[in-house]
Amino acid sequence: MNRTATEKRAMIIRCLTEGNSIRSTVRMTGAAKNTVTKLVVEFGEFAAWYQDKMLRDLKCTDLQLDEIWAFCGCKEKNKGTSSHPQGGDIWTWTALCRDTKLVPSWLVGDRGMNSAREIVDDLASRLANRVQISTDGHRAYVHAIKGAFGHDVDYGRLIKVYGTDNQGREIVVRADKVPTIGNPEMDNVCTSHVERQNLTMRMQMRRFTRLTNGFSKKAENHAAMVSIHFLNYNFIRKHQTLKTAPAVAAGVISKPMTLEELLDLFDEFRSDLYPVNRPLRYRPRSNRETYEPQTPLTPWYLDPESGGRCPPMDQRKPGIAYGDE
């Protein structure tokens, strides 16, 4: 069956957002590996740009933040002996709206203070009102939220206390809710929803699946796939609890979008970002000469009035092909 270019690209993206690796996508769609990789990078760039534009002035009231581990090229402990010296552990920070399940902000980076500040600053720029925020006990969140929101936020932490079981294994003994900034509603201090979103990421992106070889080899490709995942999650995929897309529940769009609609927007985005530029030396032809078709000449020996093979020039008859010409 012949498919149009849009249908083939849509099939590739659907495969990637349903937990398939690049090589399995190649086998299912028949596309070349380089074609799939190129589409991931370019469509990921569009996905990040489109969501950055659309996810503004959000009316969220209850947010949860968390980070999820993965690795790029190799694990951190193997960097010294790996063929990917720039690889190592990579963390994806996410912010989830508890009510609408929208993910308004995410970041791919390390687990340090700078990454925490970057995602919290970005999140603060997208909100239209005072919110309550819940995180785990990672101390980087405290400094980042204070710097971005000041005291204009209700912030509580869920700090897990660890112990050991009878076999000496580390287990969670209890989870303490600690008010940190403002006056948070302690019953709503929770990270269960954003941790469930981490499971969705691991199930729908092969790069996050443990004990496989589908992990990212480049951090740029990893970030591009994360952007595509959240574009599909926020604007296309109907959430099982909400029965609609999170962007619809948050009032960003009126109805769930289709992948074909987003691919049309992607084509417009790419044509504006990468316009076709002709070379500077190119000049179109302004005056093209046209030639009327000519009738073939009659050989001199077929016309008895031609005057022979080589008559003088003033005695030659037009339309005759003479022997000396």
Image: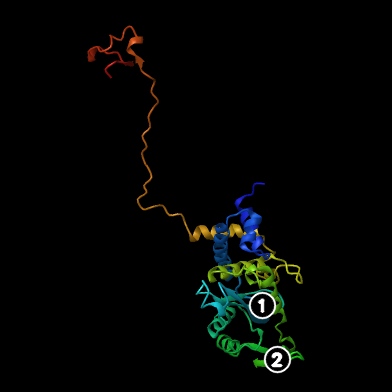
Query: Splitting the image into 4 quarters, where does residue 58 fall?
Result: bottom right
Judge whether 139 appears above or below 125 on screen: below
Toward the viewer: 65 or 70? 70
Query: Splitting the image into 4 quarters, where does residue 95 fall?
Result: bottom right
Query: Splitting the image into 4 quarters, where does residue 24 fall?
Result: bottom right
Q: Is residue 260 visible?
A: no
Per the image, label 2 sits on a secondary structure element best described as strand
Q: Which mark is residue 140?
A: none
Toward the viewer: 15 or 211? 211
Q: Position of residue 120 (x, y in %)?
A: 58, 82
Q: On the image, numbered disc 1 is attached to which residue?
A: 96
Q: Position of residue 41 (x, y in %)?
A: 55, 64
Q: Position of residue 20 (x, y in %)?
A: 66, 63
The amino acid beneath tag 2 is Tyr
Q: Nearer the viewer, mark 2 or mark 1?
A: 2
Q: Which mark is residue 162?
A: 2
Instruction: Rate crowding at label 2 as few (under 14), some (14 to 19) or many (20 or more) other CA atoms within 10 Å.
Output: few
Per the image, label 1 sits on a secondary structure element best described as strand
Q: CA distance from mark 2 to mark 1?
A: 25 Å
Q: Residue at x 28, y 9 (%)?
A: 308
Sequence-first tag of 2 and 1: 1
Q: Is residue 245 visible?
A: yes
Q: Position of residue 267 (x, y in %)?
A: 56, 57
